[in-house]
Image: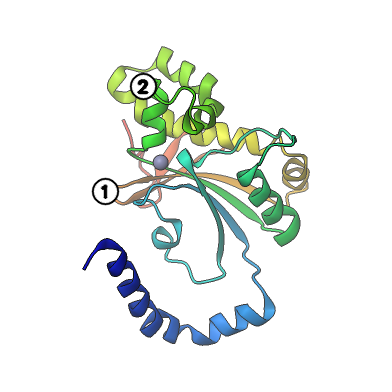
Amino acid sequence: MNEFDRLVDGYHRFRQDRFTRQNALYRDLAETGQSPRVMVIACCDSRADPAMIFDTAPGEIFVVRNVANLVPPYAPSDDYHGTSAALEFAVTGLGVAHILVLGHARCGGIAASLSGDGRGTFIGRWMSILEDTRRGVRDSTEGDAQPRALELAGVGKSLENLMTFPFVAELVREERLQLHGGYFDIATGILNLRDPSSGEFTSVLDGAPAFT
Ligand SMILES: [Zn+2]
């Protein structure tokens, strides 16, 4: 069985198991439409799937995934803006009450950004969203600690960029929308949340600082 056959095999398991158990929910969602209250902005990385990490039901979270879970700054133009389009729909169409930017450990996009790879590529251009942040981390952090430092700082930068979207900033001011930062450590499975005032991340398991 090759990888793709395994995928279709997985579909059959889903159809028989989860879909059967949640058949009424799927039918209801099909008829009434989706109304998720939470948007998650996550990385494409195959190890950091928000639906799996948060054990969510269908219809519960609206997810956009891109390289390194980045939010670009608000910059309307004739270019194609996939993440901004998803954000616009989540906020102005679905009216989500929460947006979580979910970073993760061992992020390939972050590693590429630090190594300077990807000039002239789509990834290089995309990671330039973190150009200033990367420079700051490089100046302040030892080499080995830079990937994690930039993964964490990148979440902060994306939260900052979210506030450059007028429809986000307005709802946050009116306290109808809350922004959150998170970080999933793949090897330990520990989820960390970002304190909005200090920018520090702590584990949701025991509230202890997750990193030294
Ligand atoms: Zn990643």
**What residue is shown with label 1?**
188
Q: Helix, strand or loop at disc 2?
A: helix
In this picture, is 155 found above or below 136? below
Residue at the image point whose x is 46% and y is 34% from the top: 200
Which amino acid type is shown beneath numbered disc 2? Ser
User: Residue 38: image x %, image y %?
Assistant: 59, 58
Q: Element under label 1?
A: loop
The residue under label 1 is which amino acid type? Answer: Thr
Residue 41, position as x, y percentages in the image: 54, 48
Q: Residue at x 65, y 32 (%)?
A: 73
Mark 1 CB lies closer than 8 A to ligand 1:
no
Q: Quadrant of residue 36?
A: bottom right
* The quadrant where residue 109 appears: top left
Give the numbered dot on residue 115. Answer: 2
Q: Nearer the viewer, residue 55 or 212?
A: 55
Taking the image as shown, residue 146 lies to the left or right of residue 69, namely: left
Colour pattern: rainbow
* Res. 149 visible in picture: no
Q: Is residue 61 visible?
A: yes
Q: Which quarter of the rendered picture does the C terminus lie within? A: top left
In front: label 1 or label 2: 2
